[in-house]
Image (cartoon, helix red, strand yellow):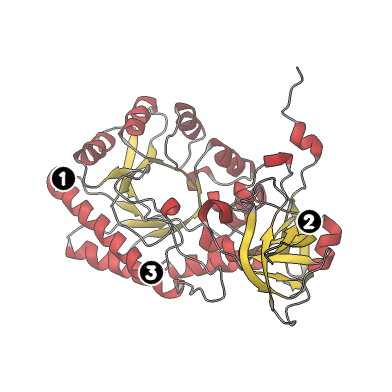
Amino acid sequence: MTKINGVSLYELKSKYQTPLYIYDEDMIRNQCKIFTKNFRHPKMKSNVVYASKAFLTIAMAQLIHSEGLYLDCVSQGEVYTALKAGFPVEKIVLHGNNKTKEELMMALNFKIGTIVVDNEYEAKMLATLVNDSYKVNVMLRVNPGIDAHTHEYIKTSTLDSKFGMSTLDTRTIETIKLLSNQPDINFLGTHSHIGSQILEEQSFYDHAITILNFYKKIKDETGIELTAINLGGGFGVKYLKDDVRLNLNVVLKELLDIIYQKSNELELKLPHVFIEPGRSIVAEAGYTLYTINQIKTTINHKNYIFIDGSMNDHIRTALYQAKYDCLIVGKENLNHDINYTIAGKACESGDIIIHDIKLPEAYPEDLLLVKTTGAYHYSMASHYNRLTIPPVVFIKDGKHRLVVRKESFMDLLSHDEEL
């Protein structure tokens, strides 16, 4: 593999240097279309909301808008990026836990389309801030207690999760009453999210049924009939050769069918259904290109490839023990008979990109391409050791364009003040 979507990796190295984040724009757009095409039902309204924490830049926000998706933001910075990109405010969803008064005020001032409050504290704070100049759509994040089979750090729905209010907690229904009775709030329903990188279809179906049963309980106890349901994201992607992708063409349609059938069974109003894919839209469209600097073999015969990047631009291996595949550019057809550990240049023993992988013999100045780095790589990059964050390029129709420029050392110092 020496090209991505018709663009030479050697050309990209020459033009932008390395490390370099590369996105296949056509693949991103295709993933957006898979969601918007399949997440439809003849009897219910539905929308796809891109979870921008996976990867967000001005160009990415513009791409998402052009594909007809909504945009989920979890901070003032993400909202500001969306606004600078010209994203329609009515299609922005402000999310995240532990929202500040300033964040809520920003959302109200700019008339952001929907606010998802995380808990009773946020609900009460929002109730004091709204006024009759703007009736804001609001949802409440709830925690259905579903234990999706994924990494501990990316489970979000266990009973002691930092996110949302438990559906088993009596305070949750009281908070729903509070929001429903506010004249300047249009309370739509609940948001919930059971975790990330989920590959079991049944988890999504169980999630929807659990929430609809909760809606039935709310209706029976309070008379409040909720009109919308947001089931978050978590759709798993393929990181390694042996990983199995979710069949989104099947899962998305089946999910809506189950919601339709269960709503009718429980005699509930058919809800407006939202989902929030992030990783599943961008992960496999992204790559990180590195240059191999050094090769090292220890006294115990452990082989290291040292690249010019680090955990600064690839934190997920250290943070989640995530696993990745890679290749040495132009050597895919050679024997993969040497076991290497891919390590970075940060001054940390945990700065490992890939722990064990069979590759052809590597040499300094070879290019190394790590796959499926489109989600939570650029967005989680840091300046540890005062390393710069790599630039980002989009590739489309055999052409490349810079969407985030390479940081300079002056950028690193731009906020520093002298004594």
Name the residue that disc number 2 marks.
18
Name which quarter of the figure residue 41 lies in. bottom left
Q: Using the numbered discs, state the Cα–Cα distance from disc 1 to disc 3 in whole angstroms.
A: 34 Å
The reply, left or right, for residue 344 in relation to residue 114 is: right
| Amino acid under disc 3 | Glu
The reply, left or right, for residue 418 in relation to residue 36 is: right
Q: Position of residue 117 (x, y in %)?
A: 37, 39
In-front residue for pair 274/299: 299
Q: Using the numbered discs, state the Cα–Cα distance from disc 1 to disc 2 in whole angstroms.
A: 59 Å
Marked residue nearer the N-terminal end (1 or 2)? 2
Disc 1 or disc 3, which is closer to the eye? 3
Q: Is residue 52 visible?
A: no
Query: Which element is circle 1 on?
Result: loop
The reply, left or right, for residue 122 in relation to residue 236 is: left
Q: Position of residue 283 (x, y in %)?
A: 58, 62
Query: Which element is circle 3 on?
Result: loop
Name the residue that disc number 1 marks.
223
Marked residue nearer the N-terminal end (3 or 2)? 2
